């Protein structure tokens, strides 16, 4: 990809939309219902106005972050998204190599299009496994055991999908997975039928005891993804979670829930300082990363932009997406006088433009 016409993540989104088949583009870019929550995620970041500290003597910013016993070069990682093979045949293997180059973690979806072992063998990026709990717990347990054997470092339990959201674009398109794209890590009977991203086997009756169960089947830290209220954030820590991901599934589950940036401050305030708080949904610029850090996140995860990078340029496309975001973050830290990630606090964001809490 030529950097001259790919200057930001929006350029990648536009280029990917040109390249992908319309139904695949809709599956990736779309959300549930009328896509109000999808739009709200982006709008919340658009409303932010940063308050720079000039002449701060900050010098070159340090973007290093320490989380869950690891150290990463940037306060960001790749969110779990199904079937990277939809965007490029190399799929998750390419993404893992790009994450290794950027030194950021990659959360591999339960619905990955490549095997957990192939992904681990491709690169030494920090890998985490996203877990969907199936009614048949053995399927879930086997997945977790494989991940642990292959060196994955954490589990991310997705809590906001006891059933799949109603995605109008996919329903209209009658979306089916193209030949050659399938969940590479699941037994054939764990999903409905070939070609369907279907989840009849999901356990719709999960409760907080699943955190303890996940802790009992491996010794990996467990993060709960899909938390949108302070009360649930507290419940997650009480249930034994090692971290939370503030997420509305990129607006793909219940249309009408808040933007993640909107609820971040109250959630960050509700959990002990020792509990890592990650956020995803609508992060598209370095200033968005900085705003999320300022309002209480320890790091952010990127969903769609990674798939756009894959669609445009396979591994090098994802490398460039992560590189651009890192460079934009360094620019934003320099120009706001923020020397380290830990120095990003609420005073960086103009209160009147903070999304209503
Ligand atoms: C997702 N997401 C998701 N989450 C999850 O826990 N397991 C999954 O398999 C998937 N699959 C998936 C597929 C696609 C195509 C998208 C776009 C998203 C949700 C994802 O982890 C994350 O919450 C959002 O994508 C973050 O929002 P942005 O960065 O896409 O705006």
Image (tube, rainbow, N blue to C red):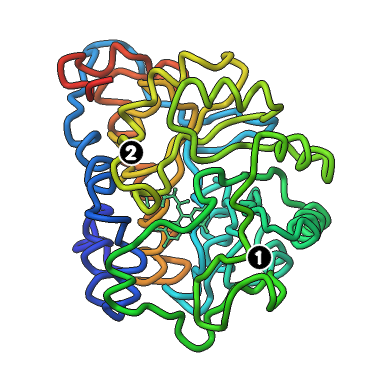
The residue labelled by disc 2 is 257
Direction from residue 103 to residue 122 in the image, left or right = right
Q: Residue at 56% of width from left, 83% of height from top?
A: 194
Q: Residue at 56% of width from left, 32% of height from top?
A: 244
Direction from residue 10 to residue 160 in the image, left or right = right
Q: Residues within 10 Å of mark 2 (few under 14, many from 20)?
A: some
Disc 2: residue Cβ within 8 A of ligand 1's nearest atom: no
Q: Residue at 70% of width from left, 30% of height from top?
A: 69
The residue labelled by disc 1 is 119
Above or below for 315 versus 176 = above
Residue 127 rendering spot, x and y as whole percentages: 65, 51
Residue 65 rendering spot, x and y as whole percentages: 54, 29
Direction from residue 15 to residue 105 in the image, left or right = right
Identify the secondary structure beneath mark 1.
helix
Looking at this rendering, what residue extends furthest in the bottom direction? 179
Nearest the eye: 95 or 28: 28
Ranked by sequence position, the earlier of labels 2 and 1 is 1
Q: Are marks 2 and 1 in contact (CB under 8 Å)?
A: no
Tag nearer the camera, 2 or 1: 2
Nearest the eye: 207 or 133: 207
Looking at this rendering, what residue extends furthest in the front direction? 205
Residue 102 rendering spot, x and y as whole percentages: 51, 49
Q: Residues within 10 Å of mark 1 (few under 14, many from 20)?
A: many
Residue 41 rendering spot, x and y as whole percentages: 28, 41
Q: How many marks?
A: 2
Above or below for 152 versus 285 = below
Q: Indicate which disc residue 156 carries.
A: none
Identify the secondary structure beneath mark 2.
loop
Q: Ligand 1, what quadrant?
A: bottom left
Rendering quarter of residue 265: top left
Nearest the eye: 63 or 347: 347
Q: Quadrant of the C terminus?
A: top left
């Amino acid at each position: 990809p030529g950097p001259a016409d790919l200057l930001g993540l929006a350029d990648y989104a536009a280029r990917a939309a040109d390249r992908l088949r319309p139904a695949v583009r809709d599956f990736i870019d779309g959300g549930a219902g009328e896509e109000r929550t999808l739009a709200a995620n982006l709008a919340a970041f658009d409303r932010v106005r940063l308050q720079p500290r000039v002449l701060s003597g900050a010098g070159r910013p340090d973007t290093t972050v320490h989380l869950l016993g690891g150290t990463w070069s940037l306060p960001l990682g790749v969110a779990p998204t199904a079937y990277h093979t939809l965007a490029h045949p190399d799929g998750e293997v390419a993404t893992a190599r790009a994450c290794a180059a950027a030194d950021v973690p990659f959360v591999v979806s339960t619905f990955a299009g490549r095997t957990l072992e192939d992904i681990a063998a491709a690169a030494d990026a920090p890998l985490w496994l996203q877990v969907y709990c199936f009614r048949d717990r053995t399927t879930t347990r086997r997945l977790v055991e494989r991940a642990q054997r292959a060196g994955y470092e954490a589990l991310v339990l997705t809590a906001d999908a006891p059933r799949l959201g109603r995605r109008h674009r996919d329903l209209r398109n009658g979306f089916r997975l193209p030949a050659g794209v399938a969940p590479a890590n699941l037994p054939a009977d764990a999903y409905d039928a070939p070609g369907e991203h279907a989840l009849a086997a999901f356990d719709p009756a999960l409760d907080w005891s699943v955190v303890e169960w996940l802790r009992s089947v491996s010794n990996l830290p467990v993060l709960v993804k899909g938390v949108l209220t302070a009360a649930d954030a507290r419940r997650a820590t009480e249930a034994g979670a090692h971290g939370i991901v503030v997420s509305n599934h990129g607006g793909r589950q219940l249309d009408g829930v808040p933007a993640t940036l909107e609820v971040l401050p109250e959630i960050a305030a509700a959990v002990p300082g020792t509990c890592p708080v990650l956020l995803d949904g609508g992060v598209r610029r370095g200033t968005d990363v900085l705003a999320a850090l300022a309002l209480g996140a320890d790091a952010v995860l990127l969903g769609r932009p990674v798939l756009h990078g894959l669609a445009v340029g396979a591994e090098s496309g994802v490398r460039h997406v992560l590189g651009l975001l890192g460079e934009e973050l360094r620019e934003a830290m320099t120009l706001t006088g923020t020397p380290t990630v830990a120095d990003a606090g609420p005073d960086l964001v103009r209160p009147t433009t903070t999304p209503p809490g």
